[in-house]
Image: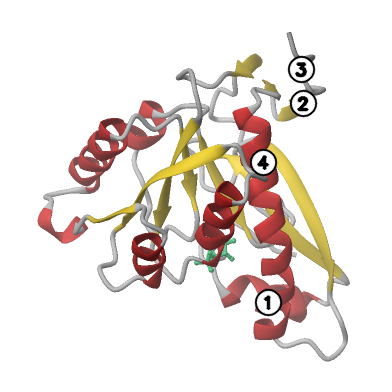
Amino acid sequence: MRRCHYSGREPVPVQTEVKQAMPGKLKVGVLVSGGGTNLQAIMDHAADGRLDAEVAVVISNVETAYALERARQAGVNAVFLDHRAYPDRAAFDRVVVEKLREHEIGLVALAGYMRIFTDVFTDAFAGRIMNIHPSLIPAFCGKGMHGLHVHQAVLDYGAKVTGCTVHFVTREVDAGPIILQRAAPVLDDDTAEILSERVLEQEHEAYSDAIQLFAEARLRIEGRRVRVLPPREPH
Ligand code: GRF
């Protein structure tokens, strides 16, 4: 099975209560490169009140990403930043960080963002970046494991259950502390496309659930584990 292991090279905070940085409604910045169905689910949940957060900006490094169009249609700031205009990854990341700060972002959600980032980005928003991956980490993740490759690898291996993982982003790819996971069955006649649709349904629930927990300041990182705290009593 394709596994991605935490190498142990990177220090993980021993115990960190992840707090919402700013008072008021949590402002989320979403980074995308593709179709944006996860973005759509987050925006829909924010609009119908299930999610107590606001998508304040959507940034893409791909001008034609349909996710940008989804943002525009929802009346959300949609920003295209062309990475080819910058000398290196760090320079591009500095511009992304600047743009997120401009919008007073309290949480960054990566939703199909196909760009390797530098420490400039992870350090600027440490403990405030989430990613969603379409497998049950640590299975079928890491280098080369994206899009339909993930689901094809699940089928080739013969796994009977797969799913999705929402995790905090650290310097190591797909290795940050896991916030929550949702499972989906693998059926005999599945193709990678069919399986990806089944997993996406779970992703659309999982991402908003994780963001809501963050908005309620109910996530505490303890080493590699993320503890979900009980709801706070109203004052
Ligand atoms: C999802 O499968 C997500 O897990 C992965 O990229 C895909 C993005 O899909 N990181 P969409 O653009 O949200 O439809």
**Numbered tag placed on residue 232 in the rendering:** 3
Whether label 4 touches label 2, CB < 8 Å: no
The picture places residue 16, in percent across and down from the top left corner, at 62, 16
Whether label 3 touches label 1, CB < 8 Å: no
Dot 3 beta carbon under 8 Å from ligand 1: no
Q: Can you identify the residue that label 2 sits on?
A: 227
Dot 1 beta carbon under 8 Å from ligand 1: no
Dot 4 beta carbon under 8 Å from ligand 1: no
Q: Can you identify the residue that label 4 sits on?
A: 210
Label 1 packing within 10 angstroms: few (<14), some (14-19), many (20+): few
Label 2 packing within 10 angstroms: few (<14), some (14-19), many (20+): some
Q: Secondary structure at mark 3?
A: loop
- From mark 4 to mark 2, how far is it between C-alphas? 12 Å
Please say whether residue 6 is visible from this viewpoint: no
Label 3 packing within 10 angstroms: few (<14), some (14-19), many (20+): few
The tally of labels here is 4
Above or below, 162 against 30 in this view is: below
Q: Secondary structure at mark 4?
A: helix
Q: Which residue is nearer to you in this view: 11 or 34?
A: 34
Q: Amino acid at mark 2?
A: Arg
- First in residue order: circle 1 vs circle 2: 1
Q: Can you identify the residue that label 1 sits on?
A: 197
- From mark 1 to mark 4, how far is it between C-alphas? 20 Å
